[in-house]
Image: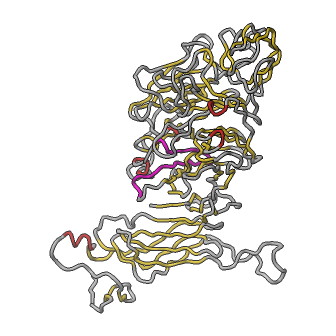
Amino acid sequence: MALLSDLVPSPTQKGAWVPRPASALLTAFAGFAGPAQVTALFQSGDIAYGMISETSGPFAGKDVPFAYNVVTSTFETINIPGGAAALPTSPAAVGDWTPPTIDIVASYVIFTHPGYPGGIGPFFGWLDISGFSDNTHTGNTHSSTLIDSLSANVLLAGWLPGMTITGAGISANTTIKSIASGGLSLTLSQTATASANGVTLTVAGGGKSAPLYGAGNTNLNPLLAVPTAVANFNGRAYFAVPGNGIQLSDSLVPLSITNASQGINPGNGLDFTALGGLPMSQTLGGILQALICFQGDTGAYQITGDPAAVGGSTLLMNQMGVGAGTLAPNTLCTTPLGLAFIAPDGLRFIEFSGQISNPVGDNGDGVNLPFLNAIFPSRMAAAFNQNTLRISVQNGAAIGQPTQEYWYDFSLKSWSGPHSFPAALIVPFQGSPNHGFTIVGTGINAKLWTSQSTPTSSDNYVENGVALSWVFRTVLLPDEDDMAEHKMVQAMFTAAIAHQQTITIQCLDEGGNILDTVSIMGPSAADTIWGAFIWGQANWGGPHTFLFQHPIFWHLPIIAKQMAILINGNSAQGTILSNIDMQIETLGYLSQATLGALGPGPPPPPTGNFLIDNLGNIITDNLGNGILVQ
């Protein structure tokens, strides 16, 4: 096939295709001030976490965190005590960028974002969902940001930067900025209004239903630059830090780096740009967890082990390959075949053995050209779920450079697309009722959608106010090296056509010119629905749609060197598309293109309308000229 636009493999019929389900709107971000571009997205259980740009209100020009519960269809209330100064500046909506990243480590949702200023400002952000609370400690205030003489080591008690802190002489919305080594003193985000000894202090984090937003840097040993990516590995936050390789947090405490040595760097002078996790199979059996760290499209490194392993550090970094990297961080996703990513030469996998696959679909075996010609590769997005890998790309090889989405089915090892609702951001979601994907549509501000790759009987086919349609187009046929013209008089299309639907079938020549057009209609009446008719006044069951061979009644014999069949129709429940059978005869003269290349000689057979005898031979053209066909 050359096109399977807005079609997906049939879940019940081998070798058949059906219309894909429409995406359904989850939320339009009501209650946000001038919501615009959604810049980051991550799903954990029922909660979709992310960031969205606001264009008005107190956070105008900033990206604001959100936590949307897809089951209750509500936003969790996020407390932002630091105000606008704690939020990152919104990025440009177009062009190459450093994509924000999100991961959950212990009880924290960690954000990296290119809009964090660094320096004396925040380096990264987080949502505290720990539910932590403690009021059993005291300390001395000094009409400054210092609290000292704490009654115990509060680090051991679970206190962390970003938590709110209250007590006599401490202003509202004050948080812990940092905690000193040993945990007996700390720095506040605001100056205390009084000095007193033995002040009872109450410290609290956020919860899943009421997250607490914070921003800053790691405690004790800060990150040395604004990180470009974060990933959870062995319960630690691994930060990709420009100029400093990887810095890693304490185990299960993502906001602290106790030892300055908690880092790893290959020493080749290149920055890490994307991080993705992968379990690795071992020769002797078992699974070894690994973190794959990409240095742009130069290559990747594999990190294994942990610095605090029993018996001593087992932390290792090994180079995986040269020239097999990615410029598209948002295309990293785990799949049954390994870690998928879009390299400059197409879709690749880092397999569980640690081997890097060849590009999938190259040299005409599938979809590859759009990825080779990606406009702004860093804007690409991909995710895997429901046995399907979905990849969105702005295709520089297509007319108008549209953003398109292609799907790769792992069972069939086949592609479909381009699909008409590409994602700017896409993440998998396992759960009820929206098992499938959560997406942000390309060019659609302030909306989250749920999208399924597996069709069901309850599917809808209206998406963002637009009725879906599909395109089913073959490659050029027949694929023979005979240099001859071919004739097709008879053809059949195996399909089930939905009620009151019409499909249009066109035969095209090599240049895309239409040789003929016919239509096939589905049943005009709907199936009888129990309880919705008067007994005795309707056919039992009604005209069910079913799969069978529909004859294609061409208006004239189709004559061409090669031809393609283009079929399209509106998406509807009950539509199934399968084989096209064509009876093709090889004619006894060279193709017109071949004759033209031979130079002077007999003119090629005329084109247009012909008179055909009962054997299918052309005997006169539309001008009445006799034609002899051997």
The answer to whether 237 appears left or right of 209 in the picture is left
The answer to whether 450 appears left or right of 582 in the picture is right
Q: Nearer the viewer, residue 549 or 575?
A: 575
Residue that appears at 61% across and 32% down: 111
Q: Residue 384: which quarter of the image? A: top right
Please state the extent of the stretch shown in magenta in the rendering: 378-398
- Residue 385 part of the magenta-drawn span: yes
Whole-percent x, y for residue 102 in the image? 60, 34
The answer to whether 110 appears left or right of 274 in the picture is right
Whole-percent x, y for residue 95 in the image? 46, 44
Residue that appears at 37% across and 89% down: 613
Q: Nearer the viewer, residue 392 or 212?
A: 212
Residue that appears at 57% across and 58% down: 8
The answer to whether 92 appears left or right of 374 in the picture is right
Q: Farthest residue in the bottom direction?
A: 624
Q: Which quadrant of the figure contains the C terminus?
A: bottom left
Q: Is residue 148 above or below residue 445?
A: above
Q: Is residue 610 above or below residue 165?
A: below
Whole-percent x, y for residue 382 in the image? 54, 45
Residue that appears at 31% across and 88% down: 621
